[in-house]
Image (cartoon, coloured by chain):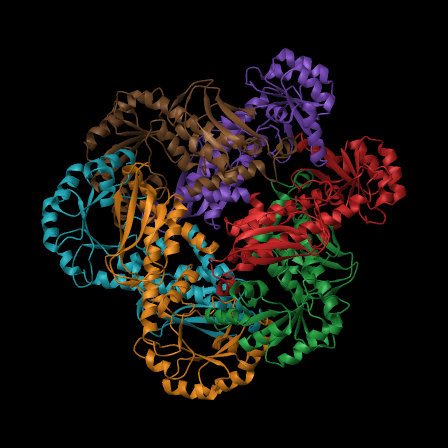
Chain colours: A purple, B brown, C cyan, D orange, E green, F red
Amino acid sequence: MHTLNELIELALKEDIGSGDITTDATVSPDTDGTGDVIAKDDFILAGLDVARNVFTCLDPQVFFSTTFKDGAIVKTGQIVFSVQGKLCAILKAERTSLNFIQRLSGIATLTRTYVDRLKESNVRIVDTRKTTPGWRVLEKYAVKIGGGSNHRTGLFDGVLIKDNHISACGGIRTAVDRARKRIHHLVKIEVEVTDMAELAEALSAGADVIMLDNMTRDQIRKAVKKINSRALVEVSGGVNLDNLAQLAETGVDFISVGALTHSAKSVDMSMKIRNH
Amino acid sequence: MHTLNELIELALKEDIGSGDITTDATVSPDTDGTGDVIAKDDFILAGLDVARNVFTCLDPQVFFSTTFKDGAIVKTGQIVFSVQGKLCAILKAERTSLNFIQRLSGIATLTRTYVDRLKESNVRIVDTRKTTPGWRVLEKYAVKIGGGSNHRTGLFDGVLIKDNHISACGGIRTAVDRARKRIHHLVKIEVEVTDMAELAEALSAGADVIMLDNMTRDQIRKAVKKINSRALVEVSGGVNLDNLAQLAETGVDFISVGALTHSAKSVDMSMKIRNH
Amino acid sequence: MHTLNELIELALKEDIGSGDITTDATVSPDTDGTGDVIAKDDFILAGLDVARNVFTCLDPQVFFSTTFKDGAIVKTGQIVFSVQGKLCAILKAERTSLNFIQRLSGIATLTRTYVDRLKESNVRIVDTRKTTPGWRVLEKYAVKIGGGSNHRTGLFDGVLIKDNHISACGGIRTAVDRARKRIHHLVKIEVEVTDMAELAEALSAGADVIMLDNMTRDQIRKAVKKINSRALVEVSGGVNLDNLAQLAETGVDFISVGALTHSAKSVDMSMKIRNH
Amino acid sequence: MHTLNELIELALKEDIGSGDITTDATVSPDTDGTGDVIAKDDFILAGLDVARNVFTCLDPQVFFSTTFKDGAIVKTGQIVFSVQGKLCAILKAERTSLNFIQRLSGIATLTRTYVDRLKESNVRIVDTRKTTPGWRVLEKYAVKIGGGSNHRTGLFDGVLIKDNHISACGGIRTAVDRARKRIHHLVKIEVEVTDMAELAEALSAGADVIMLDNMTRDQIRKAVKKINSRALVEVSGGVNLDNLAQLAETGVDFISVGALTHSAKSVDMSMKIRNH
Amino acid sequence: MHTLNELIELALKEDIGSGDITTDATVSPDTDGTGDVIAKDDFILAGLDVARNVFTCLDPQVFFSTTFKDGAIVKTGQIVFSVQGKLCAILKAERTSLNFIQRLSGIATLTRTYVDRLKESNVRIVDTRKTTPGWRVLEKYAVKIGGGSNHRTGLFDGVLIKDNHISACGGIRTAVDRARKRIHHLVKIEVEVTDMAELAEALSAGADVIMLDNMTRDQIRKAVKKINSRALVEVSGGVNLDNLAQLAETGVDFISVGALTHSAKSVDMSMKIRNH
Amino acid sequence: MHTLNELIELALKEDIGSGDITTDATVSPDTDGTGDVIAKDDFILAGLDVARNVFTCLDPQVFFSTTFKDGAIVKTGQIVFSVQGKLCAILKAERTSLNFIQRLSGIATLTRTYVDRLKESNVRIVDTRKTTPGWRVLEKYAVKIGGGSNHRTGLFDGVLIKDNHISACGGIRTAVDRARKRIHHLVKIEVEVTDMAELAEALSAGADVIMLDNMTRDQIRKAVKKINSRALVEVSGGVNLDNLAQLAETGVDFISVGALTHSAKSVDMSMKIRNH
């Protein structure tokens, strides 16, 4: 929550800097008004809280109201939210607020598209660490709102042993043993494997979760059979909307999709002011 | 530059938090290594400086090298840059560094696509304030690297009088007069107009730049003729790769494109470690 | 606004540090009181907002009241403002609050003296970047309150090409061309010139504003004639209250005066407490 | 020291903001150069360290050199200091650096004028808390460089019981007793008195230092006699260059002068660049 | 006060980080509740304010109530304080709040034990600078609450010349003279001495306070006699509960005890939630 | 790492504040020297890095050397570490540096005492969240150095469902189910139980780790038998050096001990300066 405030302050500073010279010159500081934010797309809404925080960070007297909750389907032309208060504050915060909610709603909307492809299945779509720097918590929240699940938050709350770690310490077993010894007892260990030999080693080392990296569907199926519920199974790499359903049928538990956060487009909204 | 450091620190904190438990458990703090970042796409490169800063922010001893400069065309399979130093630092900074450069290169690459459509023309593609909060300066830099031009940086270094300002103060002339009186003498005044009547008023009020908002090509042509070089002309709204060339032929000076920053996808790269 | 808060916090910290040991030892934390700030000089008032913010930053419960607005003429003996609340908070913030408003009122008062000399004229008195580090926005605000106009805020919102830039890039034309190409289209270009040859080059390069640096009145008159409304004209250097009116008669648009901010004296006020 | 860095960063941010658009457009980032700062006045120099820090804060590679030390007398036309390095960094930091050293040298120079009037005497000129907010430590340093002495740094490192404290707690004796009981044993207690009755009470309460506030010279002389070395004596209020010598002859130990910091003018310097 | 907020934020961040995943998963954000903090020990209470601030820093709507004041004796089983509000906020702040108040109460309780040994005497127990880094002001406050007195807050508000300073500048007299000349006139000078020769030099140099370091009781008695009220006397080193009373009988003014802050144990409390 | 720097800066600021007036007055800024830190106790050393960082944070030129590593046994009289450089910097950082390393070594030393009691056993001693606010990472590090293991770092990297959570959401099963659904797949779930009924429910809900809270040894033995390796087992509450060995014999995996961090005493060291 603290980190979010830092990002909001950074964002307001970079936009307003030494002052909004247009608004300060043309709008009287005493003028009240209402801004209605209108959807220009159909989308899954995410980010109402941060959108509100941007306004209240600039002026705690701005009153924010909405008929929606995060996760709602919004249709073109609907009013997403309204803000009421000093027009100067509303106009200064407008762009920054919209930049936040448009991006987060874009992520939620894209995630929903992925999740909808797996309706019949228990497989979970999970995000990755390929998020916009500074936005980790926000973007992971948007993924959840879109129906996806989160992977670990960062490097601190889950062990994921990758090829580079393995080569650096001389083998999967060594890596897993070292991790087991040094991490606390509420964290699980995931190991990334690329073939059946590595898989065998990871299983015998006692990995809690196996990540099958860039494998073909056939390899995945074989791997799932071999694992046989001794560990959770995650698929990673080369996932897209076209092969998603087929990947899900292989019996894995999780499919991770970097595109949810690194390639989502912003949805479109715009604010219309009513003077009082 | 200071703001960038704040963003990098925010980004490293959100990813590393209380520690990279995988690397700390599996890789000795004394192990040296080299990481090569390899292109998995063709793209226009942007963000080498920030990519390097992420590593040196974590460990000033990491040595960064590259054969490219920002703006270069990178082909799939080429080494974008290499980092050499303590493996622990390299592994901790890897994801954050790549998250920066992949997004910035994505923006530069998309911008280049737009710019290439206007090769024969003097019309400039310009960005907007629809940037990722916290990333304003970075994303505007990437637009420039891609061959685009920048619009004002934020609310502080240019006057852009929009519909909401006009209705708040009672008319275009009043708005322009107030701005002229209150701003310092090195800033120009741009006015957004949506029809010929507003255009006439803006011109007579002495606007330095006219923004034609969401007009048809016919309207734009008529407006350009009317303006007759008394002001610079910018087109905004509804721009895409398909109508870009035709818009450029109307005689305007600038075409602003929000998509450059709000809808670019990250390009793909990955790091491969060589132990020493 | 944010930057102002940083300065206020810095100022309160440097004065209060680990605690106001006198007040904490002698005044009970429950004692209420009112402090009246009394003018010991005649002056133009500037800085009521920041004076209030210092108190409310320390204790949001302090109630601030005044019969004046910034820009008012205050006479010796009048009550500038009053604060009511916990005496401890009032005593701790008193000196810092007064240090702000006394200095800002000093700048407004000095500016008014300059402006009054030009009553009959349309020439504008403008400030410079010779402000107290940390105080840029505050001091420029005080200049405005005193009837002056602002020059650019800083290096970011206006191009001013000076002798050092010209010599570094090989000539006025090159400098102007480079600037025109790289800056966005809402910023104007000002060029500093010291003789008629430079003036000719600046005009032909298309400078929007010309700064005549340290010229004699005769030179200035000649330059104004030569410029002939093709650019705005600013005079800089060697300006004082004695030659101001004569400079204004030369036909220039702006006269910039560093002394407004770098050599203003604080006006005198003091606080008197009434216990409740 | 930390606080100083905060002020320097604040100052650089307020001037450079999103970038020095003139320098970035006209000067190549690779160009080296030397800037010589030349005195345009005679003055006592103060602030070399902070002037250097401004440059190195922006670019640690800038090399700073000078033949002077703080406290030196600098004559018009002399080179105060030189900086060598990337021209871009030098031009961006120039104004902020000069704004610091010009103001501090102004304070040192004014202080020296006061101190010189007391050459024959042992009386010390001391400063007050009427300093520029954010600049406390810097300005007190400049006073010392000018030959003055410092009073307490802030509210935290000395007890000064004033009229408002006395009325709030019901009398001088109560105030002194409470302070004695609550402060630690390395801090002295000063009491402000305005007449002989208060003086008597302060002495009998055991004040370590007596401040004679706004008394006539006759009253001061009487007070000094009465105190008879049982406490140190400070005179405050209504001090100026004209009555300074006479005040010193009354036998007091300290004369405090708010004007040293709240009404000093900046001295004049300017930077001249030599390209390499 | 500001510094305390920084420490509270640091503490909440280190505990909550990217989120309290247990509470967020199991407790609805709308659930209200009351938490009663119950004493599991007998102790002197210290730190109610900071305990409350931790909760309100996280959620200003949490209502804090208590029947105690700092300094009260709390018995096992009593309710120390209660907090009422959103259960989520209460659960997230609980541990941090208790960690503060348990440690501060531990210090107050230990201090009281020392102070109680000196009931009949006027000698004051004072703390040292051997405090927990980041906690200086808090721990010195707890010492006061326990009945002890504070020594100087830090290096800035009192001169204490120790062996290392003396050897660095060549003797006690030189050290005292230099200090007298450079410090302001509201700070006293204390000198640490280890034998009678040093004591003689310190006295003749005019030290305001003498610290007898690691002397035997006989030496102390002799020193006190020699000092003969010309300076305050502090004993330091080797103090414990067993020799405290005897040290007090030597006639010294202050006995400083590092253990008050560097070796106090936390007292025990725990929170019990009542759902609404 | 970043958080540590914040704590070090906080600590230096609270001690040095506006300046070390003793050192600045008595020691020339040019004087070099060496400080040897000597052990006055036998202890397990922990905190060399932070001790060094305090010095280099103040002056990067201070050279730090030691013959020990964290975890070493240090004997009374040995030199723990030495610092060489400007005497002023060394004297200013001395107390803060020692305050850190003395406390951390105290924790490591106390932890070792606990660990030594379990030499023959595989049971791990783990710490708790009862750490000094601001010191979480440091103190957990010291526990590790002393031979203990860490529990979760904070609320963010492990699920621990306690009585308050259970009552808030209506039962152990609901709590575990909700957690399982909302947390990511690399975090384990621990449930605190106080009797056999709760234990049965936690096991059937699929808890990964069971915390037996304040049970008798008999109950613990029964619980371990019932759990039968289906979950890891942690004992908490009422642990001390006397019952530790017996608790270990019950077959549990972890024993958590709050005293390691909330009740450790600092070990004793002091610095002796050699001038150069």
Direction top: furthest residue:
A218
Q: Nearer the viewer, residue E62 or E21?
A: E21
Total label count? Answer: 0
* Residue at 71 percent of width and 41 percent of height: F150
Image coordinates of residue C27 in percent, x first then y, are: 55, 72
- Give the quarter of the image for residue C217: bottom left
Image coordinates of residue E255 in percent, x first then y, are: 67, 70
Q: Is residue F43 visible?
A: yes
Q: Quadrant of the C terminus of chain D?
A: top left
Q: Is residue A78 visible?
A: no
- Give the quarter of the image for residue F70: top right
Image coordinates of residue F8 in percent, x first then y, are: 57, 51
A41 relative to B178 in the view: left or right:
right
Image coordinates of residue E166 in percent, x first then y, are: 55, 66
Direction front: furthest residue:
F276
* Residue at 60 percent of width and 51 percent of height: F82
Is residue C94 depicted above or below C190 in this figure?
below
- Give the quarter of the image for residue E191: bottom right
Is residue A113 depicted above or below F268 in this figure?
above
Q: Nearer the viewer, residue B232 or C160?
A: C160
Q: Nearer the viewer, residue F193 or B87?
A: B87
B201 relative to C135 in the view: left or right:
left
